[in-house]
Amino acid sequence: MNRISSILESLGIEALSPMQKEMLQVTSQSVDIQLLSPTGSGKTLAYLLPLVLQLDTTVDSLQALVVVPSRELAQQSSSVLKQMRVPVKTLCLYGGRPAMDEHRQLRDVLPQLVFATPGRLCDHIDKCNIDLSHVSLLVIDEFDKCLEMGFEKDMRCIVESLSKRRQTWLLSATAPDKMVDFVCLNSTVTLDYTEENPARNNRIETLLVPSPVPDKLETLARILSVLKEKSAIVFVAHRESVERVGDFLKKCGFIAEMYHGGMEQQRRERAVFRFRSGGSNILVSTDLAARGLDIPHVDTVIHYHLPIDEAAYIHRCGRTARWDSSGSTYVILGPKEELPGYVKYEQTQMVDDVRIFPARPQWCTLYIGRGKKDKLSKGDIVGFFCKKGGLKASDINHIHVGIHHAYVSIVRSSLKSALQAVSGEKIKGMKTIIEEMAE
């Protein structure tokens, strides 16, 4: 238990939730598990904690696979593992970058745990780039999402490549329509936490906002004006709608980020960092952002377009009121739209008379043209801006260090003075570009 206490201390968590405790207890029984739990309930820690306790960190062999539907979820799950500060060698495998580079990493790192998307993992299996002979645990996170995205063939390939003596843990926010036979579960224990939780429901206030016209853009802008600096994810139905709504909000003066599957990976990463770090208080997205993104604190969810079904509605709402926090959801209803029966609301809010007045977030985001390849660390960035930029540690919110670049969010009121102070200065002895990230 001392090891568990140490991990929780590293994560800044005082105690496990009932779901996480039960998962920890059941995983010690060497059975296959199906965990059903809502988005935002802590499923990642629920499986990572018992997983790392099972790994033999003295052996340089791959012992566990975590399969996820998207590169973002792979990266974020890996990030949670790093925060746990356990001596586990790990890698993330996903598309959008050369498979050859990952093959070299597999040879050099000899990971004990791999986070991977189905297609990329199958590619490495087909090319014999990865040794699965010692894998004793397979975790498929967001199993229902993997099926929805058409990964059944790839998951079948992965399962058939593993020993039948392995354990399998399936995690999902909703029960899949059908349990496919290729997973081959044995002695399965199902932990079902999907039942409506009155305590959680009481933490989310749902408001219905009528739009006087079919085009809801101005109604959305008025809602955001009411919310002021509060963070909000605006869900729309299509990629084209993301661009249209995002462009409209920017023209109105809001600092809004856009996120959908058709965007380049770097642009998506920048959008998520800027929103998560407070540099932007609005994220306009398709349902892609409903799951798989590690954004701990979202004040509000706005349904600009109605969700396609109840499951989509649940996942969207799950982005707010995570853990023990509270939140609100707004459903914008056009004059010819009918409210689905599964949407229950406390009150109707009229915003027709609200003046559109964008609020500026407390933080802003800077781009630094150096990264891990230049041996730049978060500590280097904090020291640089405190010594050269005249900032205090409390003036710096979040830092992300990528391979070739870094992002840092600083308090907006000090933006101009900090940029002037560091102009022409070297960071860790290196000249580089330091500029505000374009809005």
Image (cartoon, rainbow, N blue to C red):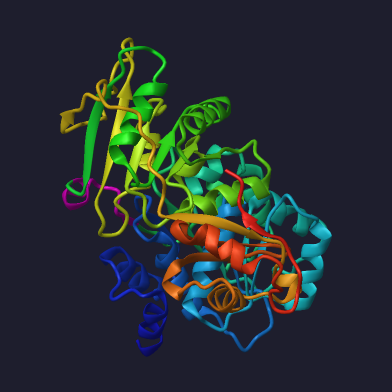
Of the pair 186 and 171, the residue shown nearer to us = 171
Magenta stretch bounds: 191-201
Hey, which quadrant is residue 125 in on the image?
Answer: bottom right
Residue drawn where x is 25% and y is 59% of the image: 324
The N terminus lies in quadrant: bottom left
Residue drawn where x is 61% and y is 43% of the image: 152
Q: Is residue 216 above or below residue 30?
A: above
Of the pair 135 and 386, the residue shown nearer to us = 386
- Is residue 195 magenta-colored? yes
Image coordinates for residue 434, horizontal then vertical, percent: 66, 61
Q: Residue furthest top?
A: 336
Of the pair 84 and 283, the residue shown nearer to us = 283
**Residue 139 visible in the shown view:** no
Residue drawn where x is 57% and y is 29% of the image: 243
**Residue 420 visible in the shown view:** yes
Residue drawn where x is 24% and y is 27% of the image: 208
Q: Is residue 377 left or right of residue 202?
A: right
The C terminus lies in quadrant: top right
Image coordinates for residue 171, horizontal then vertical, percent: 44, 55
Image coordinates for residue 429, horizontal then vertical, percent: 74, 79
